[in-house]
Image (tube, rainbow, N blue to C red):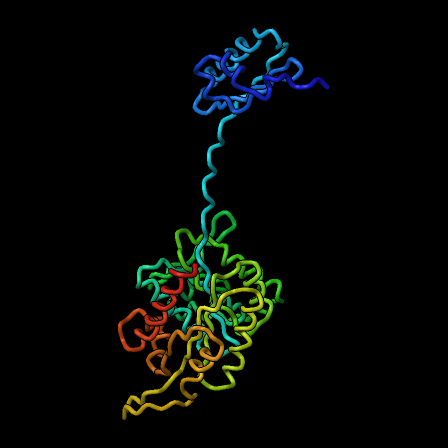
Amino acid sequence: MSSPSPLSTQNDPLRQHLPEALRARVQSLRLAGGVVTLVLDGSGLDEAARAEAEGAAKAALGALPDVTDVRVGLIADRPAEPPKPKGPIIISVGAGKGGVGKSTLSANLAVALARQGVKVGLVDADIYGPSQPRLLGTEGIKPEAADSRMFPIPSPWGVGVLSMGNLIEPGKAIAWRGSMASGALGQMVDAHWGDTQVLIVDLPPGTGDVQLTMIQKHKPAGAIIVSTPQDLALMDAVRAIQLFDMVGVPIVGLVENMAGYVCPHCGEVSDPFGLGGAEKAAGEMGINFLGRVPLDLSIRLDSDAGKPPAAGDTLQGKAFAAIATRLADWLKVNA
């Protein structure tokens, strides 16, 4: 193999033989065994100008006495690829057991965030017990689809929603194995969410296949855990927290639901499920306590009527709004 000419390590003597307009475009220049290899920056040159530059370089360098061949390459920076559209930030709402008001919190949390100017969507991942169509007033409406992907159903409260309750006949039991349920969840999360900023996912209670698939495939930015104040519910809430901890999903915080009952007749406050248990547990585990939601008849009546309390400014609605504000604050720092 021929050793490189001294000119190959000192590019300036070769560069000076190029037309002045090409000198600033030199990326690399090498002479070895009589062969000059030249790489030029072709940015901004059309096809004719590139051919002209290549011809001028070959003519100038090919005239040198030590040169037997000139090889010219023109490169240009590839246009930057457009950024991939960023999907919505996923926040999962979970509970260690059923009956603690997780779905009611999910619906009202979504509505409260929407009222604060956030573009919010809601996925009802409780495949076997979907309740969001009733809570958000979308019963009987089926989602449209395009390109094998569904569009969320607009609710009257500014929140798009997808739920198995909108895909099956009312009252029909869903007898699916875990893989089928997980597949249905994936289709709802991967739907046409457009410019949705935050996607609230109402998980089924417990720590089974659907929860694991959701966490592993879609990786929520954070999780909110719902519990009632009594010890039995808190034990299950701790298991849900441990599930998210195991797979590295941050816990946004713990919500205490059904916390205190105000008698509509005498105004006396009682605590049938205890008081402060979730807040105490949050402190012991070192996680945020997001707030309390009272045990109130109006929440049940409004929820059954498809009118989320968070859509109004009642005391009950303000309880949900306060939790939504704490979530929004968490998102600003962590998402």
Front-lying residue, 91 or 10:
10
In terms of image quadrants, where is residue 260? Answer: bottom left
231 displayed left or right of 153? right
- Residue 85 in the image, given as x and y percentages of width and height: 45, 47
Front-lying residue, 327 or 13:
13
Say above or below: 20 vs 263: above
325 displayed left or right of 11? left
Residue plotted at (47% across, 48% down): 146
In terms of image quadrants, where is residue 178? Answer: bottom right
Residue plotted at (39% across, 89% down): 271
Say above or below: 252 vs 20: below
Residue at the far right in the pictured view:
1
175 displayed left or right of 167? right
- Residue 276 in the image, given as x and y percentages of width and height: 41, 84
Q: How many marks?
A: 0
In terms of image quadrants, where is residue 298? Answer: bottom left
Front-lying residue, 47 or 107:
47
Residue plotted at (54% across, 70% down): 128
Say above or below: 66 vs 169: above
Does residue 170 appear in this view? no
- Residue 112 in the image, given as x and y percentages of width and height: 34, 67
Front-lying residue, 299 or 92:
92
In the picture, the quarter occupied by the C terminus is bottom left
Does residue 263 appear in this view? yes
- Residue 267 in the image, given as x and y percentages of width and height: 28, 90
188 displayed left or right of 2? left
Residue plotted at (52% across, 50% down): 148
In the picture, the quarter occupied by the N terminus is top right
